[in-house]
Image (cartoon, helix red, strand yellow):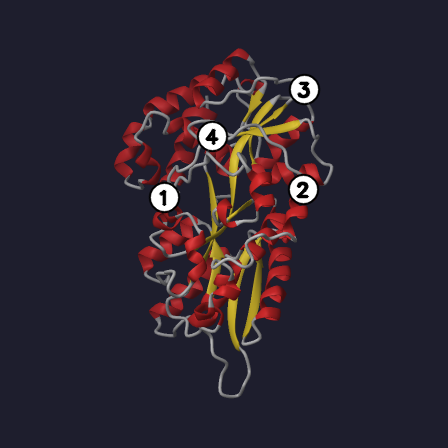
């Protein structure tokens, strides 16, 4: 989890349930707006069927957990029902079994002069957007081909230089037991003070094993650095990490077990649910999903802080060498419609990829103060360097 420059304000405490989100899915006050696919003839008619009359078929590779597969199993039939001239052939790569080989196949096909390698559309995180930008494998996108790109916050597109579509999002937040914590911190400085004032009641996971812990570490490291530093992958910035690592090292005696760092995002959620700690960093969608499934108490609340923990989109990237780009654009335009975005919120327990103002009023009301405040850290290979130094400077103490 991913997952833009800071453009929104801090978030108040929140809890949402799948039932609430699902109630928004069928209601769309904006379906007749210019932003909807039906009002964008250039997008809906962009892919012409072959002379045989058969629809244009393109291949879509994606990876993730079962909920990601369930999402596309819902959205693709919705799209094809409205767009009979396009056929989407999904190829699901289960989480942890093949993202890198899929990208390698795209690059190898390009280098061998074999076109797209039969991969027209690809889903992944910001690291692969950046990598593909360096290797020149992604198509630059614009609203003339995909009108509903105008539904996205321009800053989000600028952060990936228009090489990808940020179609859904999630964020790391503070998750806390509201029965024990009645006044949670709202700033990073306030959180650091709370941790020291409440020994062993806060936990974050080993940053190399999950984004929730990585977010906490990165947020502390960049606390006193310029805001633009979170988008800087220049190794020279590593020299400015000393103060942050000293802070993390000092915190060791105050966190859970006086320096125990659970493995994976789920490790800290288990500690919170079991009452061993009162506060952790966690992915918002994981908290919501587990509350909806009855695995996490409803007394667990969430809150963003200032400066915000990292979060961000999952991206869709168009292979620059695809010969099916018009059909892919037609599909992407649908994905960015309020109708499809409501399904994404329902299925993924996350935030819409488009601006809330483009969603139905009901959806805007439900998400007010929820999907705001997070920042996207785009550090390139520096994330690996952070993990290495954390192991030596913090975990080893």
Pointer 1: what residue? Answer: 381
Hey, which residue is sitting farthest top in the picture?
Answer: 197
How far from the left and from the top, in percent, is residue 356? Answer: 51, 45
**Is 190 located above or below residue 324 in the figure?**
above
* C-alpha distance separating marks 1 and 4: 28 Å
Q: Which residue sits at x=39%, y=43%?
A: 4
Going from the N terminus, do you reach mark 1 or mark 2 first? 2
* C-alpha distance separating marks 2 and 3: 23 Å
Mark 2 lies on a secondary structure that is: helix
* C-alpha distance separating marks 3 and 1: 40 Å
Q: Which residue sits at x=52%, y=57%?
A: 337
Hey, which residue is sitting farthest bottom in the picture?
Answer: 52
Going from the N terminus, do you reach mark 3 or mark 4 first? 4
Going from the N terminus, do you reach mark 3 or mark 1 first? 3
Tell me if I can see residue 120 in this picture: no
**Is 249 located above or below residue 209 in the figure?**
above
Label 1 CA crowd tier, 10 Å (few <14, some 14–19, many 20+): few
Pointer 2: what residue? Answer: 20
Pointer 4: what residue? Answer: 10
Going from the N terminus, do you reach mark 2 or mark 3 first? 2
Q: Nearer the viewer, mark 1 or mark 2?
A: 2
The disc at residue 87 is none
Q: Nearer the viewer, mark 1 or mark 4?
A: 4
């Amino acid at each position: 989890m991913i997952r833009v420059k800071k453009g929104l304000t801090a978030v108040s405490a929140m809890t949402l349930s799948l039932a609430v989100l699902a109630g928004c899915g069928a209601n769309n006050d904006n379906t007749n707006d210019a932003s909807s696919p039906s009002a964008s003839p250039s997008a809906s008619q962009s892919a012409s069927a072959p002379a045989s009359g058969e629809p244009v078929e393109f291949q879509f590779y994606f990876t993730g957990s079962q909920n990601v597969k369930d999402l596309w199993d819902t959205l693709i039939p919705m799209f094809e029902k409205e767009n009979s001239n396009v056929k989407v052939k999904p190829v699901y790569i289960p989480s942890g079994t093949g993202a890198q080989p899929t990208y390698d196949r795209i690059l190898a096909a390009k280098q061998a002069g074999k076109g797209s390698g039969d991969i027209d559309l690809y889903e992944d995180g910001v690291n692969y957007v950046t990598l593909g930008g360096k290797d020149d494998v992604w198509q630059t996108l614009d609203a003339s081909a995909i009108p509903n790109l105008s539904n996205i916050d321009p800053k989000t597109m600028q952060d990936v230089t228009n090489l990808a579509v940020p179609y859904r999002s999630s964020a790391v937040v503070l998750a806390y037991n509201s029965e024990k914590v009645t006044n949670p911190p709202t700033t990073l400085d306030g959180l650091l003070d709370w941790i020291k004032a409440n020994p062993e009641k806060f936990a974050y996971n080993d940053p190399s094993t999950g984004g929730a812990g990585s977010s906490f570490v990165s947020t502390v490291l960049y606390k006193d650095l310029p805001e633009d530093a979170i988008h800087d992958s220049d190794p020279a910035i590593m020299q400015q990490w000393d103060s942050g690592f000293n802070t993390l090292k000092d915190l060791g005696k105050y966190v859970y077990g006086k320096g125990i760092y659970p493995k994976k995002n789920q490790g800290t959620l288990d500690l919170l649910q079991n009452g061993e700690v009162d506060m952790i960093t966690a992915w918002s969608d994981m908290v919501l999903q587990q509350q909806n499934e009855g695995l996490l108490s409803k007394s667990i609340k969430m809150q963003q802080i200032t400066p915000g923990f990292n979060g961000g989109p999952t991206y869709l990237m168009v292979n620059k060498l695809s010969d099916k780009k018009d059909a892919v654009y037609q599909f992407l335009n649908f994905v960015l419609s309020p109708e499809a975005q409501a399904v994404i919120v329902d299925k993924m327990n996350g935030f819409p990829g488009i601006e809330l103002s483009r969603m139905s009023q009901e959806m805007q009301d439900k998400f007010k103060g929820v999907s705001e405040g997070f920042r996207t850290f785009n550090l390139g290979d520096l994330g690996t360097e952070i993990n290495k130094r954390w192991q030596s400077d913090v975990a080893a103490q």
